[in-house]
Image (tube, coloured by chain):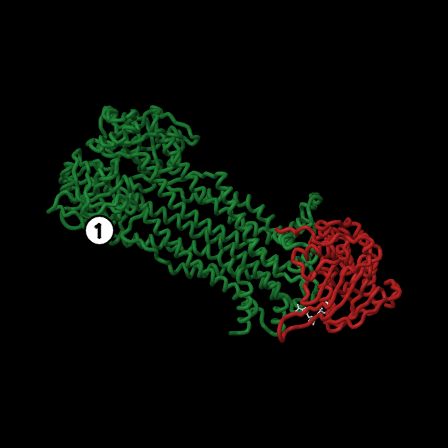
Amino acid sequence: MSLLDRKLLRDLRALKSQALAVALVMACGLAMMIMTRSLILSLDTTRDTYYRENRFGEVFARLKRAPNAVREQLVAIPGVAAVQTGIAIQVTLDVPGLPEPAVGLINSLPERGEPVLNRPYVRAGRLPLGRTTRGELAVGEAFAESHGLKPGDTLAAILNGTKQTFRLSGIVLSPEFVFEAPPGAALPDNKTYGVFWMPYKELATAFQLYGAFNNVSLTLAPGASEGEVIAAVNRVLAPYGARGAYGRSHHPSHRRVDDEIRVLQGLSVAFPLVFLSVAAFMTNSVMSRQIALQREQIAMLKACGFSNAQVGAHYFKFSLAIVFVGVGLGAVGGIVLGHRLVEMYHLFFRFPQLDFVLDSRVLVAAAGVSALAAFAGVAGAVRRAVRLPPAEAMRPEAPASFRPALIERLGGARWFTASFRMALRNIERRPVRSGLTCLALALATGILIVPNSFRDGVTYVIDFQWDIVQRQTVTLTLVEPGPARAIADFRHLPGVELAEPFRYVPIELRAGPVMRRLNLQGLPARGTLSRVIDAEPRQLTLPAHGIVISAKLADILHVRPGDEVIAKVLEGRERELSVPIVGLAEDFAGMAAYMELHALNRLLLEGDRISGAHLVVNAGLWPDFLAAVKNTPRAAGCVIKNSIRDGFRKTTAESIGLLQNMYLVFATIVAFGIIYNSARISLSERARELATLRVLGFSRGEVGAVLVGELVLLTLVALPLGLLIGSGFAKVILASVNTETVRLPLVLTASNYAFAVLVVALASALSALFAARKLADINLVSALKALD
Amino acid sequence: MTAAPASPLPPPPAPAAAREPIFHVRDLARVYGEGTAAVTALRGVDLDLFRGELIVLLGASGSGKSTLLNQLGGLDSPTHGTLFYRGWNLGTADEAGLTHFRRDAVGFVFQAYNLIPSLTARENVALITEICRDPMAPEDALELVGLTPRMDHFPAQLSGGEQQRVAIARAIAKRPEVLLCDEPTGALDVHTGITVLEAIERINRDLGTLAVIITHNAILADMADRVFTLSDGRIINARTNARRGSVRDLAW
Ligand SMILES: Nc1ncnc2c1ncn2[C@@H]1O[C@H](COP(=O)(O)OP(=O)(O)OP(=O)(O)O)[C@@H](O)[C@H]1O
Ligand SMILES: [Mg+2]
């Protein structure tokens, strides 16, 4: 080991707590980088492998009913590699222990052999045998888990009006249902929605679909155009009540995972950028101070013939040591956090196996960027040092010159105490350093705003969605749209106090080149249960003509009220209509379009039909109501508001809680680190001044106040600035996180702000106290010694 | 932030007690380090210093002058012996007591001035007057050292002599009992040194402050009431001047 390196080790030991503070801040950014990049890799590779091994389709279509022979026509489409036809149908379930009925989507399994596409992955038990044993059902893992179902348990389902009991043969997963949620839902609701598999013959027979299919998946031959294949599929299936084929990018489960990856990508850049910048600044201030203290040593080294490069490399190595620790801590942090997040993903995404895979390339990249950040931090200070001619460096630095602070020059001087002036002038003498310290503290404050604004946004959405928009207790859906008089049957169910009909029609909305598929809802003009609300929020009355759509959807389609959109009805007789947009609705989950019920029915040329009804049920008669619904053959689905609401709340609480803790730790580390370092540096720069004050009769506490006065002022400026920056962060992040499936409004509350201020102020105060302990080491007698 | 507790110092002396010593030192010793590395900086020092006296300490480098001054100023505690400030045991005082002692009773003047660079001359003085019991106005203190015209200058804008006079003004603004000066002219040329010493002499005369001055310049001994010479940690010579010379008349 060279002597210079030995000096390096000793210097490092002397500066260990400051170096650690920098390394910790660096580690925050790196942990986030390593975690997000690794999660992207984990999700990406796991999904790819899963899709490949279980042969996930690439184009999907649903239809009413087509004879099996039509399959040959699909196979014949140029560019189609493989076709899987089958039946998928929604039923009502009666789960033991669950008072309310649940909704099940039952998928058929081919009569013989494995499915060509979308092969289920068997987690436990086996697939239903079909040929030998009847009455068996395989259940999706998410639903099974949330009900504690095991192979061998039983479950009742109403198949086409007949209640039947099934034995669960096994627990399975499918690439079609990585995100196992009802269509359009932002979050999974595994208590009341499940996916099932059943032999084709049994399912088809129950619904009089034997010899036919209502669901298609297909894969593309290499080089085939998805658009062309979709068009061809639509042509083939048009006579069979097809709802329009779509590619993976519109597949709800696939898309949800894509959304998550996109969010991770954003975080993987933004976060490390912020933290590494702060770390670079901290490195710079530590190294500048170190180099200032070692002026004479540098001069001596140069006088003895060391080159500028050697001296520069020596100090750069110093910062590399910080990088080394930072990368180590960051990797550990990233891996630990990554594992936690993967656990959280199990709440949302179902893969045969989702493991945290450390992206080893990101480790290299992390080391690279943090070395770069450290280099950027050190370069300026080192350059100044090596530029100094040796003779000059041998002399002590000239005494600092000061002038009255701006605020004093403006006439505010009279009321300030001497120690307050010292703080002001010290801040002004180093505007860049003070500014950056302030900015770093503001960033710490700002990042705390983000997760809490998520939380408040979610609370707002929950209240908005279920107190303002949807005020029913329960929603009942019919197996198939039925005559409007069905509403009378619903009114007669026990406990029903209010019933309002609705109609759902799958449509494709088009404006220019942009197209979206969604359910068009027909509602009473001014209902009291499921209401259409605008941004105010104020209830909109649905006019006799025209369509009201989500503001988000209008954004996507680039349309405004007054414009016309093309609505293609995807159910029954296929029709294309041009309808004017008459209003914009505010909603936060999925996308919606509304029309007055009669207007919709007129448009569909179907007469008065409804898809179901929203009901208010007397709480006292609730059990009777549920029992009655479970045995109502015509009711295909029953969605209970409070159970969705609770599920939503629980899932978001869990994921946001994790985020909150993460950001809390990060913010604390930054605030603590910045203040600690600044305090230590001033302590070192002003040691003589502070010792003099002690000799002149200042108590240790008073000298401590002089030392941290500057930092207190900077913190006071940083806090409001941080609230501003944090609000901006929240806005930008929400805008980037907001997808077509989930949106959060920007909600900023006083308690969010207060919490951020409190955390940063507390971390800063503790950190300052911690640094000020070093005041005890100041040697009073040293102040009396003459300067050398 | 802990404020210093209520002053444990004795009340200001009644006129009758004027001949009581301010400092009463017996068999004072200070040893730095331990075992074979131990350095004895002071050994067996006996002293009584009185109000209004001007004392000069002489001695070779390393003889223990600064160590003695630091003991008197409450910057350091003795290893052995007794050290009383007006009947109050300075040698066994705690941290808070010493802080109070320095704040209210002692004015220090250092060879390196030790002004706060971010404060003007006036503010450097005000810094101290803000915290002590019965200060004079900073402007008056600066007037005593003849610096009224340069009051609002920062240290970097003042000459060495001017900076040292600011330091003296800062030391005396609290009306200390004792003014302790460690080579106050060490970094100054003769002419500037005279101005600074005159300022000290004037304060000693006008306010009756006990002044203790360390110097390497034996000629300065003539301005003192008493002169002590140290060697190897002991007082080897104590001399009383029958008549004190004024700084101007010294044979520079
Ligand atoms: N903190 C310390 N640790 C160890 N030894 C010390 C310490 N301070 C002073 N000494 C020693 O004590 C002795 C007296 O030092 P002191 O500073 O009192 O001398 P001085 O008379 O003021 O000298 P000078 O005229 O050079 O200022 C010296 O030998 C010195 O090396
Ligand atoms: Mg000395």
Asked if residue A115 is positioned above or below residue B186 in the image, the reply reads: above
Asked if residue A557 is positioned above or below residue A658 in the image, the reply reads: above
A617 vs A3, left or right, is left
User: Residue A472: x percent and y percent?
Assistant: 32, 30
Residue B159 visible in the displayed image: no
Chain under numbered label 1: A
Q: The green chain is which one?
A: A
- Which residue is painted at 61% across and 68% down in the image? A298
SS state under label 1: strand
Asked if residue B55 is positioned above or below residue B133 in the image, the reply reads: below
Asked whether mark 1 lies closer than 8 Å to ligand 1, one says: no
- Quarter of the view holding residue A205: top left
- Quarter of the view holding residue B213: bottom right
Give A624 or A159, whichever is nearer the viewer. A624
The quadrant of the image that shows the C terminus of chain A is: bottom right
A375 vs B13, left or right, is left
Q: How many labels does the image show?
A: 1
User: Residue B222: x percent and y percent?
Assistant: 85, 66
Residue A785 visible in the displayed image: yes
Give B41 or A584, whichever is nearer the viewer. B41
Q: The red chain is which one?
A: B
Task: Name the residue at the bottom extreme.
Answer: B36
Task: Name the residue at the left extreme.
Answer: A132
Amino acid found under the numbered disc labelled 1:
Ala
Find disc 1 in the rendering and name its residue: A124
User: Residue A181: x percent and y percent?
Assistant: 29, 42
Give A582 or A102, whichever is nearer the viewer. A102
User: Residue A737: x percent and y percent?
Assistant: 41, 44
- Which residue is painted at 39% across and 56% down in the image? A336
